[in-house]
Amino acid sequence: MKITILHGQKHHGSTWNTTLLLLDHLISADDECNEFFVNDIPNCIGCFTCILEDEEKCPHRSLTKPIIQAIEQSDILIVATPNYCMGMTGQLKTFFDHMAYRWMSHRPLGEMRSKLAIAVSTTAGVGAGVATKQIAKQLFWWGIPKVYRLNSAVAASKWDDVKPKIKLSIEQKAMKIAKKVKKNRRKAGRGLYQKFIFKMMGIIQKKGLGTPKDASYWKEQGWI
Ligand SMILES: Cc1cc2nc3c(=O)[nH]c(=O)nc-3n(C[C@H](O)[C@H](O)[C@H](O)COP(=O)(O)O)c2cc1C
């Protein structure tokens, strides 16, 4: 099983440690893991080159390509972020912006339909659920059918200050999610709503309401 882990922060805090707890229960010796920190990617400059012309022409492609290739070759994707002001980190959102061309409304990768993902977030008080929901929404639009969400309120600014009782409850949640992912990973497939959205996007491409680049991609894939 191939797993890609994206960290929306560089430091080894509560979110990173929560992700490690998840990995402890999810991966085994034969699994291949690729890990990335998305911090050094510059902001999307809004040039539209990826959408209208070619993603390879993105000025930040050398930084994003290795990450995108790893994601596209993975069976499971883990995306982790601390809650910053009721949402994912800006750094992570910046990475997601570079994936706009892979939305179902543009040029989605067909294989996304057989992947599973886990969104991880920690917060001091409230907001981890908001952050994982934001991640799940992005991944839905890439075409990933199922995103499990591991949210934890840690009541601390540092992992060392998180109470053992809270750490135990995080580990139990991580264990349950890891078990579900291992059980369901071969059964992943689009649900009704995602199928509907995909179909609608196909109609848009067929009617020529999208970009010429996107329409030719949909034709090449044999989807329209
Ligand atoms: C810039 C910033 C914004 C934050 N915003 C919130 C917030 O809106 N609500 C909250 O409960 N905690 C907030 N926190 C606290 C962190 O979400 C919390 O401590 C989290 O566990 C940190 O994870 P980390 O150790 O992986 O960085 C914020 C922290 C930072 C640095």
Image (tube, rainbow, N blue to C red):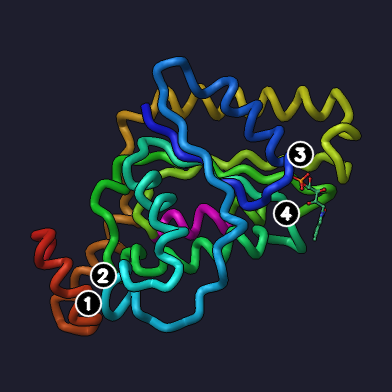
Front disc: 2 or 4: 4
**Does the image show residue 113?**
yes
Q: Secondary structure at mark 3?
A: helix
Q: Amino acid at mark 3?
A: Ser
- Viewed as shown, does residue 213 lie left or right of 52? left
Residue 219 position within the rendered picture, expressed as x and y whole percent measured from the top left: 10, 67
Nearer-N-terminus badge (3/4): 3
Q: Is mark 3 within 8 Å of ligand 1?
A: yes
Inter-mark Cα distance, 4 to 1? 35 Å
Q: Are marks 2 and 4 in contact (CB under 8 Å)?
A: no
Residue situated in front as seen by the camera: 222 or 204: 222
| Tag 1 residue | 204
| Residue range highlighted in magenta | 134-141
Are there few (<14), some (14-19), or many (20+) residues within 10 Å of tag 4? Answer: many
| Tag 3 residue | 14
Reply yes or no: does residue 135 show up in magenta.
yes
Inter-mark Cα distance, 3 to 1? 43 Å
| Tag 2 residue | 201
